[in-house]
Image: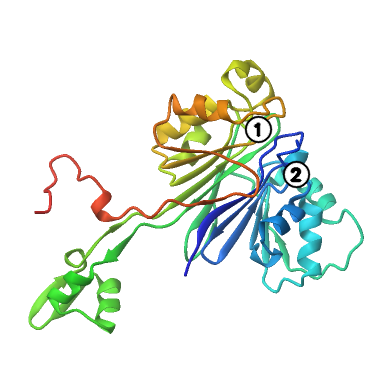
Amino acid sequence: MSVRELIVLGTASQVPTRQRNPNGYLLRWDTEGLLFDPGEGTQRQMVLAGVSSSAITRICLTHFHGDHCLGVPGIVQRLSLDQVAHPVHAHYPASGRHYFERLRHASSFRDVADLREEPIERDGVFAVGVAATLEARRLDHVIESFGYRLVEPDGRRMLPEALARFGVAGPDISRLQRAGVLEMNGRTVRLEQVSEPRPGQRFAFIMDTRLCDAAYALAERADLLVIESTFLDEDAALARDYGHLTARQAASVAADCGVRRLVLTHFSQRYPDPAPFHQEAVAVFDGEIVVARDLTRIPVPRRVTGSDIAPAAGAPVPG
């Protein structure tokens, strides 16, 4: 059975606290495990969360500030120590190649993992898989930073009752899915007669940035949006100066982009109480809000089906 969930390994920004480890987020997406922005201590947080290194298939860094990458040496060495058999792809801003080189070879170890570096130089899709495409967009931080988005292609869900009504079964179902039309017992069966739209799921990951067009583009129609909210709105000037978002700004992105589940994270040490982040966000976003805590698991919302999709103006409503 496929699993799609976010495992939160750390929620602090630059300085850890007693309750918050520096950044670290593992997205489990079917057979993929995408490790985003592993800060220092990520390897231990994975142990506490019950996640093995073999779960990692990609390492995705938004930028090269320490709280987003100082866990790379431990993770890379653990891949070799555990003799992870599959390739692990590493994505990061190409302008930071020299930083990744230092992190990857920070100390002596027996390097046997198949770690494939794939630096990002520009906006757009950079990885295409069976289950989804992975794309990046340049954000507005004090150094080069990219946000990420995972997009599953739209498809269709077969309706068992409709299939039975038309007498479509067994291998004929696959043939109908491929061709879109099938001749059955002297009549034509079309795919739309026995199926309904199944919008692909979307995940977006936005770390250190000011408000910018790229943040909105990444968050558009995200089922699950993970976004930094380093500051509260009372410190909006600090957020702007240091290239960050407030909780209110992060929630406004979610509201404008039709996000289903909003995850706030990357909190400054100046705020020991997480409650104000939720209070600030709920004032502008009426969807589900999660103020992230270390070692929690956040599922991707259940898939939207055709019956959940409102018909366009003027479209016939099924009777």
Q: Nearer the viewer, residue 17 or 306?
A: 17
By what rule are the colours in the image chosen?
Answer: rainbow
Residue occupying the far right of the picture: 108
Answer yes or no: is residue 54 visible: yes
Q: Residue at x 23, y 81 (%)?
A: 169
Q: Residue at x 48, y 66 (%)?
A: 2
Q: Return the disc, 2 or 1, that comes first in the chain's sequence.
A: 2
Q: Residue at x 63, y 25 (%)?
A: 231
Q: Nearer the viewer, residue 242 or 18?
A: 18
The residue type indicated by label 2 comes to Gly
Near mark 1 (Cα within 10 A), the count class, few <14, some 14-19 or many ≥20, is many
Near mark 2 (Cα within 10 A), the count class, few <14, some 14-19 or many ≥20, is some
Q: What label does residue 96 carry, if any?
A: 2
Q: Horizontally, is 297 left or right of 220 in the view?
A: right
Which of labels 2 and 1 is toward the front?
1
The residue type indicated by label 1 comes to Phe
Q: Position of residue 229 (x, y in %)?
A: 59, 31
In the image, residue 264 sits, relative to residue 49, either above or below, namely above
What kind of element bears circle 1? loop
How many numbered circles are shown?
2
Q: Horizontally, is 278 left or right of 39 in the view?
A: left
Q: What label does residue 267 carry, if any?
A: 1
Image quarter hosting the C terminus? bottom left
Task: Indicate the quadrant where residue 49 lies.
Answer: bottom right
Answer yes or no: is residue 64 visible: no
What kind of element bears circle 2? helix
Task: Kindly report the distance in space between the C-alpha atoms of the residues bearing marks 2 and 1.
Answer: 24 Å
Q: What label does residue 102 carry, if any?
A: none
Q: Position of residue 120 (x, y in %)?
A: 64, 49
In the image, residue 135 sits, relative to residue 266, either above or below, namely below
Q: Horizontally, is 212 left or right of 315 in the view?
A: right
